[in-house]
Image (cartoon, grey):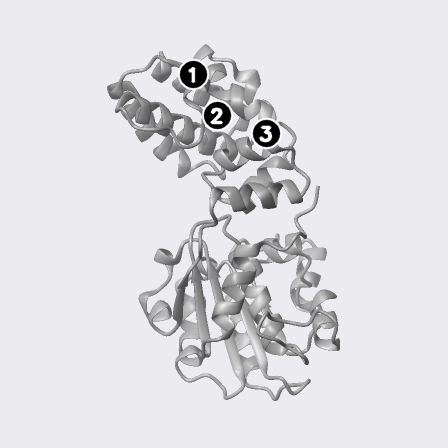
């Protein structure tokens, strides 16, 4: 299975944005719609030596330099955890501190990295095609980091362009949002997303299940399909929770479990209110649970979300989550 198959909805948005002028873009939408891929496609085209209306050529020295993560005119700003996950090199200082066990990779975009990016944007272009700064996920800037970017966004150096990609744009400072041209990410049609997932190597039925599990977001669906329990475990999960079967969550992290239970709660509540479930087929959902018990469960899950990244005891937390689910669904 591979996710290197070009997504047609990303290609269409790339063509559209390249026809417009602007020094700073904010690509906004929920996760799984391809913000990072669209941002990377834009900077590749901006820096490409032989760009077309479709985007970068993919063959020139600039495209190769981006492929191997060494382009002198591209600055990538991400949390260090995200940079490591996506294969971007950390600064020598940051890598040294992590290697020496002085600290762990940051989950936020660090202010010193932002200051380096601002200084980078003011230098002369090395390859003569201007400079580009890619920020993702932009909501991982804290207020200090975001304020370090504001002045540059307001009065950018002549040949520098910025693209901020966000999966929670409402968390950005209003002053950041107002200095960018906004672009709402396009949701692909279900048939288009299913076809892409199958081109990435999924069987048709598995593609349908994981796309539904991801709420129609194709990249989230592909990521979910690569996870070991996969489509079969997803279909069986709601009724396993109604039975109180904790073994159904044995391969899940607390964060994954809370997210899945939120979706079960949403869909069962939808059925109780005569609406169509979103994440599961109606036949896969338990028939028990009152609106009162399900609403209380939804509140409990919302409270659990606040501590899910740092549970005191993950095993005990999963047991408690299953117990709450069984009570609410019966």
Sequence-first disc among 3 and 2: 3
Question: Residue at point 51% right, 73% down?
Answer: 18
- Which labelled disc corresponds to residue 156? none
- Dot 2, crowdedness within 10 Å: few (<14), some or many (≥20)? some
Per the rendering, the mark at residue 323 is 1
Q: Is residue 239 at least partly visible in the picture?
A: yes
In the picture of the structure, the residue carrying the numbered disc 2 is 317
Label 2 sits on a secondary structure element that is helix
Where does residue 148 sit, x and y in percent of width and height? 44, 73
Q: Nearer the N terminus, badge 3 or badge 1?
A: 3
Q: Nearer the viewer, residue 74 or 277?
A: 277
The residue singled out by tag 3 in the image is 205
Image coordinates of residue 179 in percent, x first then y, are: 37, 74
Q: Is residue 110 visible?
A: no
**Quadrant location, the C terminus:** top left
Judge whether 147 appears above or below 104 on screen. below
Name the image quarter holding the N terminus: top right
Secondary structure at numbered mark 1: helix
Locate residue 159 relative to residue 2 in the image: left or right.
left
- Asked whether disc 3 touches disc 1, contact meaning CB atoms under 8 Å apart, the reply is no
Q: Quadrant of residue 247?
A: top right
Looking at the image, is 273 positioned above or below residue 52? Answer: above
Q: Nearer the viewer, residue 259 or 20?
A: 20
Nearer mark to the viewer, of 3 and 2 = 3
Q: Is residue 266 above or below residue 199?
A: above
**Image location of residue 310, percent across then percent down:** 49, 38
Q: Secondary structure at mark 3?
A: helix
Q: In x, y percent, where is residue 263?
A: 41, 31
Work out how far the residue at label 3 is from the one at label 1, CA to CA, in angstroms. 31 Å
């Amino acid at each position: 299975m591979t996710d290197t198959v070009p997504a047609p909805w990303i290609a269409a948005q790339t063509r559209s944005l390249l026809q417009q002028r602007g020094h700073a873009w904010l690509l906004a939408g929920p996760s799984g719609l391809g913000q990072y891929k669209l941002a990377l496609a834009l900077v590749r085209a901006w820096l490409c030596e032989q760009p077309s209306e479709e985007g970068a050529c993919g063959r020139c020295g600039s495209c190769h330099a981006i492929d191997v993560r060494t382009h002198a005119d591209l600055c990538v700003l991400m949390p260090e955890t995200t940079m490591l996950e996506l294969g971007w090199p950390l600064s020598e200082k940051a890598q040294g501190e992590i290697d020496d066990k002085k600290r762990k990779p940051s989950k936020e975009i660090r202010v010193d990295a932002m200051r380096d990016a601002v200084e980078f944007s003011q230098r002369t272009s090395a390859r003569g095609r201007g400079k580009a700064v890619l920020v993702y996920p932009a909501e991982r800037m804290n207020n200090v980091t975001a304020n370090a970017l504001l002045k540059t966004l307001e009065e950018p150096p002549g040949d520098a362009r910025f693209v901020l990609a966000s999966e929670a744009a409402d968390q950005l400072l209003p002053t950041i949002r107002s200095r960018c041209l906004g672009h709402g990410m396009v949701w692909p049609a279900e048939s288009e997303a299913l076809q892409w997932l199958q081109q990435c190597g999924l069987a048709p039925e598995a593609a349908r299940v994981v796309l539904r599990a991801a709420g129609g977001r194709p990249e989230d669906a592909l990521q979910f399909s690569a996870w070991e329990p996969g489509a079969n475990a997803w279909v069986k999960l709601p009724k396993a929770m109604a039975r109180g079967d904790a073994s159904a969550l044995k391969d899940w992290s607390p964060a994954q479990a809370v997210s899945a239970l939120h979706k079960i709660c949403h869909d069962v509540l939808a059925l109780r209110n005569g609406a169509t479930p979103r994440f599961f087929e109606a036949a896969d959902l338990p028939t028990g649970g009152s609106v009162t018990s399900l609403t209380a469960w939804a509140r409990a899950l919302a409270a659990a979300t606040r501590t899910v990244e740092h549970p005191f005891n993950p095993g005990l937390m999963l047991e408690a989550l299953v117990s709450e689910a069984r009570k609410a669904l019966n």
